Amino acid sequence: MKFLTKKILKFFYKISDYSQAGQDLFALELFGKNGTYIDVGSGEPKIGNNTYSLEVENNWKGFCVDFDQNNYEKRWKNCPERNNKVYWEDASKFDYNKGLIENNLPNKIDYLSCDLDPQEKTFVALKKVINDGIEPKLITFETDKYREKIDYEKLAINFLYPKNYIIAVKDVYSGLKKKKVFETWFINKNINFNQINYEKWVKKL
């Protein structure tokens, strides 16, 4: 039954019970349990969230930053298993060093999830995190390539490559929407991982 369930999940490309495209599973593949994260644009506390399983099921420490307090705060309050802090602030202006200090985190965290609307803000927030001196080992960065006229993947590459980052997983999409590429996953060059296309990574699971 476990084998059949796995095959069904692969067929529908529902990779994770929580995250949109298996971002949490990739973070666990690289770092295992007891990691650290910053979740920028966290949205819902559970379904569609990149860090729920990391915090709740794998003992990761970190914090979330989301501007949409009116829409989401009540839902987070109704998800008591999430104990790590949420900052209801503008992620493009947030003081990430303050977040590290208040949550007793190192500046070299394992995972940064960066996913805001509009897409322009995602890139601004990414630059703010890095320029605040945070050094994530893994970055999942939303590009919304399928709909954006601006190539945010290229902008992220130009910004991150001089800072010792390379692409780990390309052309990340959700569900069966292969033409709707919406993310690129970057890693620090010191991590031993060979670049792979998202579809091939999924088939390895």
Image: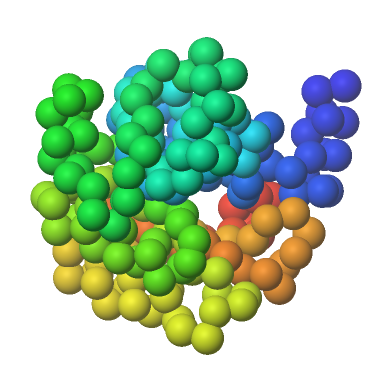
Q: Is residue 157 left or right of residue 143?
A: left
- Left or right, 132 with respect to 23, comes to left
Q: Is residue 84 above or below residue 205?
A: above
Q: Which corner quadrant of the image does residue 27 belong to? A: top left
**Camera-side residue: 28 or 203?**
28
Q: Residue at x 12, y 50 (%)?
A: 133
Query: Residue at the location (75% across, 49% down)?
Result: 13
Q: 164 or 133, which is in the foreground? A: 133
The residue lying at 56 percent from left, 19 percent from top is 79
Q: Residue furthest top?
A: 80
Quadrant (top left/top right/bottom left/bottom right) for the N terminus? top right
Residue 168 in sight here: no
Looking at the rendered image, the quarter that the C terminus falls into is top right
Does 5 appear above or below 41? above
**Quadrant position of residue 189:** bottom left
In the depicted view, which residue is nearer to us: 11 or 184? 184
Q: Position of residue 122 (x, y in %)?
A: 39, 62
Residue 2 in percent (x, y) is at 81, 23
Rendered location of residue 125, percent (x, y):
30, 58
* Residue 144 drawn at (x, y percent): 55, 69
Q: How is the image coloured?
A: rainbow
Q: In the image, what residue occupies the spot 87% across and 31% down?
A: 4
